[in-house]
Amino acid sequence: MGYLPLGLELAAAQVRDGFSWEELLDELQAEIADLEALDRLEAEEEPSDAKRKNYSLVASFNLSLKRLSAERLKKFAWLGVLPEDVTITETMATTLWNCNSVKAKKTLIYLKQKALLLPGVSSTQKTNYRLHDLLHDLARNLLQPEL
């Protein structure tokens, strides 16, 4: 599964949680329609293929984030303060989220299972992760109202 496109990995994580492909497709189409409506500034009726692909990925992110608890969404948002391409460790998460290591580890594993974190690059440490560039931007944008 690690080699599938991110949008498909996000969808697969939701299907594993019990959502049907049909439910997911309906929600995804509604989310894309909302995003397209926000972008219609001029006479352009349909977005380009590139915009549509971007909307699909952003819509996938939004659906995944909507299903997080408020606490987990806040923790995900705090990942936006980290530098891009940083390796996220359990120790780092413990400090960032002001929690114990067990809770940090469980949250990191949960976010990875939801395809919101990528596996880390270090083979010496089991619990290390990375954040996709687009998800990093989204996390940073979620946190801005709080800062």
Image: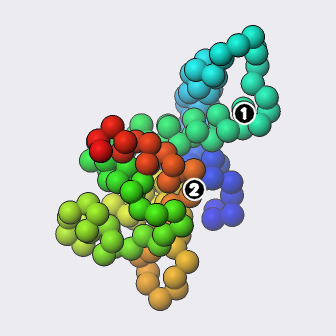
In front: 10, or 57?
Answer: 57
The disc placed on residue 8 is none
Q: Amino acid at mark 1?
A: Lys
Query: Image quadrant for the N terminus?
Result: bottom right
What residue do we see at 43% from left, 84% from top? 125
Q: Residue furthest bottom?
A: 124
The mark that comes first in sequence, 1 or 2, is 1
Q: Secondary structure at mark 2?
A: helix
What residue do we see at 58% from left, 20% from top? 38
Q: Is residue 145 left or right of residue 31?
A: left
Q: Amino acid at mark 2?
A: Asp
Q: Position of residue 78 (x, y in %)?
A: 35, 54
Q: As displayed, is residue 4 above or below residue 43?
A: below
Q: Residue furthest right?
A: 49
Q: Is residue 117 left or right of residue 29?
A: left
The quadrant in which residue 60 appears is top right
The residue beneath circle 2 is 133
Give the class, few, some or many, for how many residues have Cα within 10 Å of label 2's Cα (few <14, many ≥20): few
The residue beneath circle 1 is 51
What residue do we see at 70% from left, 13% from top? 42
Q: As displayed, is residue 97 above or below residue 31?
A: below
In front: 15, or 94?
Answer: 94
* Residue 22 appears anywhere in the view: no
* Residue 36 appears anywhere in the view: yes
What residue do we see at 29% from left, 41% from top? 146
Q: Position of residue 107 (x, y in %)?
A: 33, 61
Query: Image quadrant for the C terminus?
Result: top left
